[in-house]
Image (cartoon, rainbow, N blue to C red):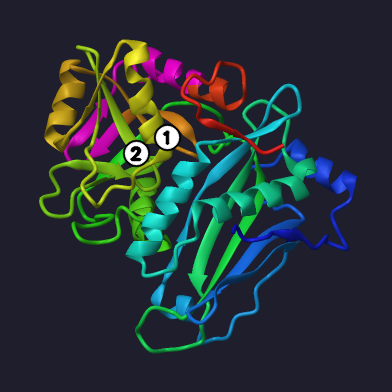
Amino acid sequence: MSLPFELRPNPNPRSQAEREAVLAAPGFGVHFTDHMAVATWTAADGWHDSAVVPYGPFSLDPATAVLHYAQEIFEGLKAYQHADGSVWLFRPDQNAARMARSAHRLALPVLEEEDFLASIDALVAADQAWVPTEAEQSLYLRPFMFASEAFLGVRAAQRVTYCCIASPAGPYFARGVHPVSIWISTAYTRAAAGGMGAAKTGGNYAASLVAQQEASAQGCDQVMFADAAEHAFVEELGGMNVYVVTADAELITPELSGSILEGVTRDSILSLAREFGLTPVERRIGVDELLEGIDSGAVTELFACGTAAVVTPIGVLKSEQGTHQVGSGETGETTAALRKNLLDVQYGRAEDTHSWLRRVL
């Protein structure tokens, strides 16, 4: 039987005027709705105490395990309002499956798919008024769980807290869809074989921050990581997967190696490739191979993808060896077409031929 997420209404929700002010310019990840879904797991009782409750802070003991050993995982997905007022999720079963894989890697309890989806359904229903209606806006959903036991011993926690919060979101990049510049880091790596790279856990993102600072110091928007062993093969950006479009109509992305996050958008684009006359390929991509391909014209487009930013064109790669402009430096035709197709499906403007959408409201 699935967990019940009964609504305990917020006695002091934001006023309509406050909500409308937020929705007029939501930004990304800075405003939050009136409620959150929560549940508790203990080794003795399993999952229990599930509900949708007023949004608010947690009270944590200074010895709470997550503060010391970073035993936590999270997900990210969006709710989209269609023209008829209905609200839909995009492939949430894949987020549930990935969260389960992450839980196994971090020695956390698995939240079953039906409970994962029930928490999101209940939260979106409670905060339906917060779902944005403007173009390319959505309600960003952030399910996460963390070790909440107060204990300093190094072992898997015997008390875990699950929560899902929601945030009205505009475009991830405030200046809109423009090609970004990428710094290829050889000083830092995101993850290594046998590590946590395939799990969606905060430590991987923390590891990317100093490299992001390095990229910013080089005048770039984002950082690209190479493999940890040889620093010779493309892995991913700090929070997005990477795709290469070639002159002979191949759509190439680095193969899953255990150190690369298996993105939902990444998988969706692989499924769409043949519909756009492209041959999808998953394999290792050498950094030198990529740069030589860009310079020779064999690589015609390069883009990053993820839930938050959807599809983002890459116009320039920079490294210690120099600067490499991808094609004209502008958004490529294939990149734009894939991005438009994904958004059209997500917002109900195109037929969902892959049965990727799940109706919430």
- What residue do we see at 21% from left, 55% from top? 187
| Amino acid identity at mark 2 | Asn
Eye-nearest disc, 2 or 1:
1
* Residue 147 drawn above or below residue 349: below
In the current view of this chain or complex, which residue is farthest to the front? 1
Q: Earlier in the sequence, mark 2 or mark 1?
A: 2
240 with respect to 319 (left or right): right
| Residue at image mark 2 | 241
| Residue at image mark 1 | 265
* Residue 108 drawn above or below residue 234: below
| Amino acid identity at mark 1 | Thr
* Residue 297 drawn above or below residue 261: above
Q: Is residue 336 magenta?
A: yes
Quadrant where the C terminus lies? Answer: top right
Residue 109 locus on image (x, y percent): 44, 68
Q: Is residue 259 magenta?
A: no
Which element is circle 2 on?
A: strand
Residue 123 locus on image (x, y percent): 70, 51
174 with respect to 236 (left or right): right
The image quadrant of residue 34 is bottom right
Decide which of 5, 252 is in the foreground and name it: 5
> Which residues, given as a range, are shown in magenta?
317-341
- What residue do we see at 18% from left, 57% from top? 193
In the current view of this chain or complex, which residue is farthest to the left? 230
- What residue do we see at 77% from left, 50% from top? 126
Residue 56 locus on image (x, y percent): 72, 67
130 with respect to 333 (left or right): right
Residue 245 locus on image (x, y percent): 27, 20
